[in-house]
Image: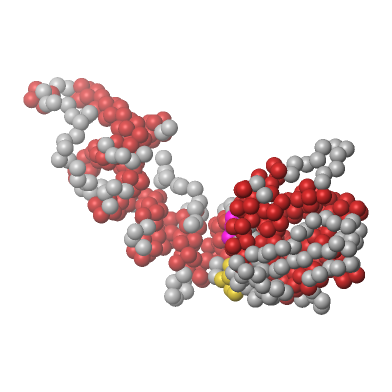
Amino acid sequence: MGPFRPDASPILIARGAEFAATPAGTGSRTTVPAAPPPPATPTATGGHRPALAAPKPPLAAKGGPVSLYFQAVEALRSGAAFQGLKKYYKFLLLSDPLLAAPLREHDLRGAAGHFPEPLPGTAPSKEAALALVLLDRLLERWEGGLRRLDALRAAFPTSAVLTFLKGELLLAAGRDDEARRLFAELATLPDPRRLPALARFLLGRHGAGEPPSPTARREFLLKAAARRWDLLDLEGAIAAYQAVIGQFPDHPEAPRALIDLLTQMDRPADAAQVLQEWEDRTGRPLLDPLPLARLRYAQGRFAEAVQVLRPLAAQDPPNALARLLLAECLFQTGGYDEAASWFQKLAAADPGNLGLLQRLAVCLEALGRPGEAATRLGMALERSPDEAPLRQDLAFLLMRMGDLDQAAIQFAFLADSDSPARYEAKKQLAVISRLKLERDGAGETAESAAGPTDPAESSAAPDHLYWEEENTHLASPGSPEHQARALTQDQIDRINQLVEAGRP
């Protein structure tokens, strides 16, 4: 049994504004809260850049967006479902927040129960119809919301509120041109109040005003995608980045961020496809060396990652991530000698990272230096005696070396601990007992074949099932004491068979 090889691993108040679906001429009024400062947007390289300053809304309101959110939630919880939906919509609309889909679904669950889908052949009340539109919009059910709005607008064709709602829904769904055309109709409708100004504000915030600003549009979409990522709405973030790529296919920021996201989601094949599509489309490189190496590492293309990482690892000041990735990629390709050198440097710089020591020990064993590996593990355990993973590694290493007595000491320590490793340790103690019985039986057979022995020696108490309490030191693998306990290759092979059989 060769050295143990683990799997690859790297390392949110507005007043008034009744949005009721009313016949033309009745009008509506809207009060707009101030937008909060825009958050910083994470970049593909892990840093942050300030988002573009949000345009100011046409009006300000008392309380601010956070107050409006809590008013909406309180109204929903108290059973005032329609009022709560309107406040929730205003909050999302006017403060430009982003709430994760599970949170929105949780907040709106009561309202959804209050306004169920109408039965076939029945028509909902005006309030219920508008409430269902708001639910579709808040939960991003674009097509369902558009169908309901079209039905309402057929009944109330000059309603400025319904026209605004459809335009805003189209804008939120990324259909900017359609939203712009619909918003332009507001000025022709009776008593639109402040809705045209609000529409211009929203178009400007989306970078879709007149004239359109591609830069503002791109930055808005990138910010929205990054915020979805921050909120762990990962599928939403993927869709958002893909939308940016669709509108700005030659701009690198969205594909870089999407590759980073997909790599973190353990979807390297999808990340590699984004990279390949960029290269096919533009003929230009996309990723800097370190993100490229991370992708190749995630793909399991370790040899390619090594070629990218070597120049980075040699830089001064040192790039710790590049060195760690290089060491791991060398390890995965069997370059144990060079990997051991890097893991030794990394472990010296970060002695509290026991994972680095574990990797180093495996490399040393693979290089035929198990004694050095055991010594390093033993020294680390003297400093941190409660590190069960290290002790387990040492115990199994000693078994592979044939040092059953010292392996039993380490497993006994684990078996008497509170660590989850105690269950495995107890199994391996039983394995060791069987091995020692086999070994001693083989020795007795050999002695019988050699003839009678000294009676004094034959009367000695057997010790193959026990070890002395004071015998807790780790014998040096090169010492005579260790050599005397070393087993033959056949016996080591038998250890490996029993170790594997004893695993859960």
Which image quadrant for residue 61? bottom right
Residue toward you, 368 or 445: 368
Which image quadrant for residue 260? bottom right
Residue toward you, 326 or 194: 194
Which image quadrant for residue 320? bottom left
Residue toward you, 119 or 404: 119
Q: Residue at x 74, y 44 (%)?
A: 115
Q: Residue at x 30, y 51 (%)?
A: 377
Quarter of the picture containing the C terminus is top left
- Relative to 47, is 342 on the left or the right? left
* Residue 317 image offset from top left, x and y in percent: 44, 75
* Residue 494 image offset from top left, x and y in percent: 36, 32
| Magenta stretch: dominant secondary structure | loop
Start-end of magenta stretch: 229-233
Number of numbered discs on residues: 0
* Residue 96 image offset from top left, x and y in percent: 67, 65
As drawn, 215 above or below 466: below
Quarter of the picture containing the N terminus is top left
* Residue 331 image offset from top left, x and y in percent: 46, 55
Question: Which residue occupies the extreme left position in the image?
Answer: 456
Residue toward you, 485 or 236: 236
